[in-house]
Amino acid sequence: MRIVGPEDLDRHLAFPALVAALRGAFLGGFHAPTRHHHHVGTGDGPGPVHLLMPAWSADAPRPGAYVGTKIVDVFPDNGRLGLPAVMGVYVLQSGETGAPLAVLDGTRLTHWRTAAVSALGADLLARPGAARLLVVGAGALAPFLARAHAAVRPLAHVAVWNHRPAGAERLAAGLRDAGLPADAVTDLEGAVRGADIVCCATLSTAPLIRGAWLQAGQHLDLVGAFTMGMREADDEALRRARVVVDTAAALTEGGDVAIAIRDGVLRPEAVVDLGALCRAEAPGRGGPDDITLFKPVGTAVADLATAILAWEAVSAA
């Protein structure tokens, strides 16, 4: 059994290939049961969450099939300790025999997977000429998001907003060093109004994005807010948008969509899933002035597809 660390993943993964692999995964070929979702501790507020996310090749057992499980923990207060909020491991096994193949760094795999799913959603939903990206949040995932979006479309500008401006400045500087035209901004409303794609990746418990700020033709991507105690956009944003999710779990787990459904703002039957878009079974953007909203909460199918791509690249090296 091989250990695949974060440096190995960074060396062997590339966003164009990963986005393509995820597009194929959402077409079908994998099975993922409902993930196990456990709250750790008994304190008030959004405390730690322990997640188990299994998936396997739909035609297992057979040669070339895979089984995998991500074990991931989300500790929202880790930033105070200088640690990422999301950490975990991914266990990849043979789908023919069940033999363990590798343990992959789950934190870095999640960064790559989440960013690539976000970029896939924008590739399917954003206007073809969308070139101005706003990243809301400057955590560990944020640079991956900017790079993933840049891999599927040419970006004329990347704006970065963070509740701590110093974090936005650091991220923007790092993106410039990576060759992206990035700047930190402090006016969130103005930045939202001026963006083509708004990508949020925060653990906010109150809406940051107001529906009144959204402009015709924009695409809104809500990557954070994965529990009912979190929220990145208000009811008006959900009301105005064409809503797409990565998995049906977003209808009951992810704060933004689940809360809007609970409160009668959004009808569940009006929500489209990413797989249906990839299979051309449902329409995405109806016209150039539509506002689209993508809410991914994470799916084990995407984790397994990412782990397979990384494992096969590492094994071939």
Image (tube, helix red, strand yellow):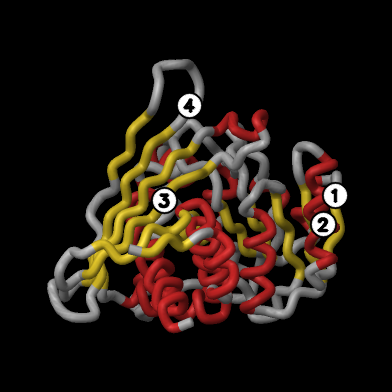
Per the image, label 2 sits on a secondary structure element best described as helix
* Quadrant in the picture for the N terminus: bottom left
User: Contact, CB < 8 Å: mark 1 with mark 2?
Assistant: yes
Name the residue nearer the viewer: 269 or 42: 42
Mark 3 or 1, closer to the camera: 3
- The answer for how far apart the CA atoms under marks 1 and 2 are is 5 Å
Q: Quadrant of residue 181?
A: bottom right
Per the image, label 3 sits on a secondary structure element best described as strand
Residue 308 % position (x, y): 37, 72
In the picture, the disc for residue 47 is 4
- The answer for how far apart the CA atoms under marks 3 and 1 are is 30 Å
Q: Which residue is mark 2?
A: 172
With 89 as the anchor, is 11 left or right in this view?
A: right
Mark 3 or 2, closer to the camera: 3
Name the residue nearer the viewer: 22 or 197: 22
Q: Earlier in the sequence, mark 2 or mark 4?
A: 4
Residue type highlighted by circle 4: Gly
Q: Is residue 308 above or below residue 36?
A: below
Mark 3 or 4, closer to the camera: 3
Q: Which residue is mark 1?
A: 169
- The answer for how far apart the CA atoms under marks 2 and 4 are is 30 Å
Residue 148 % position (x, y): 62, 69
Q: Earlier in the sequence, mark 3 or mark 1?
A: 3
Q: Which residue is mark 3?
A: 89
Dot 2, crowdedness within 10 Å: few (<14), some or many (≥20)? many
